[in-house]
Image (cartoon, coloured by chain):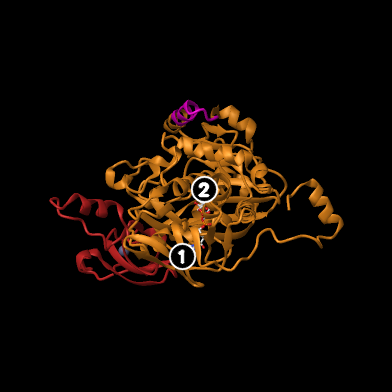
Chain colours: A red, B orange
Amino acid sequence: MLLPCPYCGPRSSEEFTYLGDASVKRPSPKAAFEKWHEFVHERRNPMGLIREFWQHTGGCRAWLVCERNTVTHEVFNMVPARSATPPGKVKA
Amino acid sequence: MRYSAFSLLAQALTGNRFAKPAWREPEPKPHYDVIIVGGGGHGLASAYYLAKEHGITNVAVLEKDHIGSGNVGRNTTIIRSNYLLEENNPFYEKSLQLWEGLEQDFNFNAMVSQRGVLMLCHSDGQRDAYARRGNAMRLHGVDAELLDRQGVREMVPYLDFDNARFPIYGGLLQRRGGTVRHDAVAWGYARGADSRGVDVIQNCEVKGIRIEHGIVKGVETSRGFIGCNKLGLAAAGHSSHVAKMAGLSLPIESHVLQAFVSEGIKPMIDNVVIFGVGHFYVSQSDKGGLVFGGDLDAYNSYARRGNLPMVEHVMEAGVSMIPALGRVRVLRAWGGIMDMTMDGSPIIGKTHIPNLYLNAGWCYGGFKATPASGFCFAHTIARDQPHELNAAFRLDRFRRGYPIDEAGRGATPNLH
Ligand SMILES: Cc1cc2nc3c(=O)[nH]c(=O)nc-3n(C[C@H](O)[C@H](O)[C@H](O)COP(=O)(O)OP(=O)(O)OC[C@H]3O[C@@H](n4cnc5c(N)ncnc54)[C@H](O)[C@@H]3O)c2cc1C
Ligand SMILES: [Zn+2]
């Protein structure tokens, strides 16, 4: 699987470290317990399109958000995490 | 028909002309007492124990593909009960005990082979951790032996003992661990359940769960609606997907795990040997092929195939442990989808819907758990309360703050 790092170009997935679903939103410290439980434990685990965090640890070390299909491993795009749509705004 | 040496001989002498299929291919009935979603090892075992232990025989197992096409037919066949935590250990030990009597119990040759499982250690710290684990096992009445370097050498002389980076210090041995022919487990449970009246329905995909007034009424399938009084989910890697149909959000991510088999070679590896670094485990099948695997690919996936970096990593780990493997050719590689939980331990229990039961989160250790999982899930469904062995595996343990984290890695599914 080649991941298109916006800084380094297409690189093998082994150069990257996976964090997981980027649609998970960290609640405010005052949020209800239930929100924290959802944030820490529950995952949509989609079959199909996922937006996820990767870090290019073996390259530029940037945090990135990748759009990928979990059934076909097709990679659609990869952007710096800071310029990706904030999780709360994403319609998954 | 009961299988025996006599029946084998009779079939052989009559050219199998009177052989009957091992299970029926029934049409789905409109309604069942219990429906199990997923004809993998756990679903079939659950149906078998529902019929055998609880006399509930109006049961259907719905499988979207053919039975054995999921992880039950894709794993590296290792069974063991060398767990550390007190929630896990008695459960896996029960499973091992059920394996020990399984073939007599369901009258099918599953080639249960207690050839011993040896986990290697490569540092003082790792040896201490194994000593602690071995002691925890023995406190639960489970067999465990800590071998020193010489003890390991006598058992498995072909290892690279003086590897510059990962020298072998010793190992933790469970002699009662071993391997089981995985397909035969699916077939044996299917045949045993079928002969007690359970309908094993293949090519029947569950596409929706009908819920009225907070109660499950049945399932929408590719072969129409099928009603039920109780519904049990045992869809392994697809658990999140199926549970979503009932509005459940699970503490699970699906990940791909790969496995490999080599060309057949002369008998070399008599046991199961597990490398203590990088994760690599190997055994030799009765056909002579070396069966081995390693870690997850580590990104979310529903594709039953992985990528090359993990292939390379597994081969590197294998050759570091057994340099002679460098000469062996790999024949086949494949992948399966793992339901990785947030604490690395499974879920068997009730849900917020009174007649919906969940069996999920097997990570990559679910094959060895098959008998106990079916046994406990059947109990939970039949009695509407967990067996004491699965009482800790409840779904709400995450919310309540009681994770069962064997590896101590926290809520990171791909690291368990
Ligand atoms: C490569 C690999 C190596 C492994 N090695 C080991 C090992 O050495 N030891 C060990 O203990 N464990 C091992 N495991 C883990 C073990 O195989 C699994 O945890 C276990 O098999 C999961 O339970 P199961 O048998 O019920 O799963 P499965 O056989 O996957 O059963 C689930 C079934 O549900 C069906 N299904 C899914 N969705 C639907 C639907 N909507 N409708 C109808 N049916 C549906 C699927 O088709 C599938 O047949 C390994 C797994 C893999 C992939
Ligand atoms: Zn980069």
Q: Name the quadrant containing residue A70.
A: bottom left
**Does the Cβ of the disc 1 residue fall within 8 Å of ligand 1?**
no
Magenta residues, dominant SS class = helix
Q: Which numbered disc flags the more N-terminal residue, 1 or 2?
A: 1
Question: Label 1: few (<14), some or many (≥20) within 10 Å?
Answer: many
Marking on residue B373: none
**In the image, is residue B8 part of the stretch drawn in magenta?**
no
**Residue A9 seen:** no
**Residue picked out by circle 2:** B374
**Residue picked out by circle 1:** B227
**Horizontal side of residue B201 vs A24, given as left or right:** right
| Residues shaded magenta | B132-143
Ligand 2 location (quadrant): bottom left
Q: Chain of mark 2?
A: B
Q: Label 2's element? A: helix
Q: Quadrant of the C terminus of chain A?
A: bottom left
Residue B229: image location, x then y, percent: 44, 58
Q: Who's the residue at 56% across and 33% down the image?
A: B173
Q: B331 or B315: nearer the eye?
A: B331
**Horizontal side of residue B269 vs B216, given as left or right:** right
Three-letter amino acid code of the residue under disc 2: Gly
Inter-mark Cα distance, 1 to 2: 22 Å
Residue B34: image location, x then y, percent: 49, 57
**Going by the picture, which residue comes out furthest to the left?**
A30
Q: Label 1's element? A: strand
**Residue B137 seen:** yes
Q: Chain of mark 1?
A: B
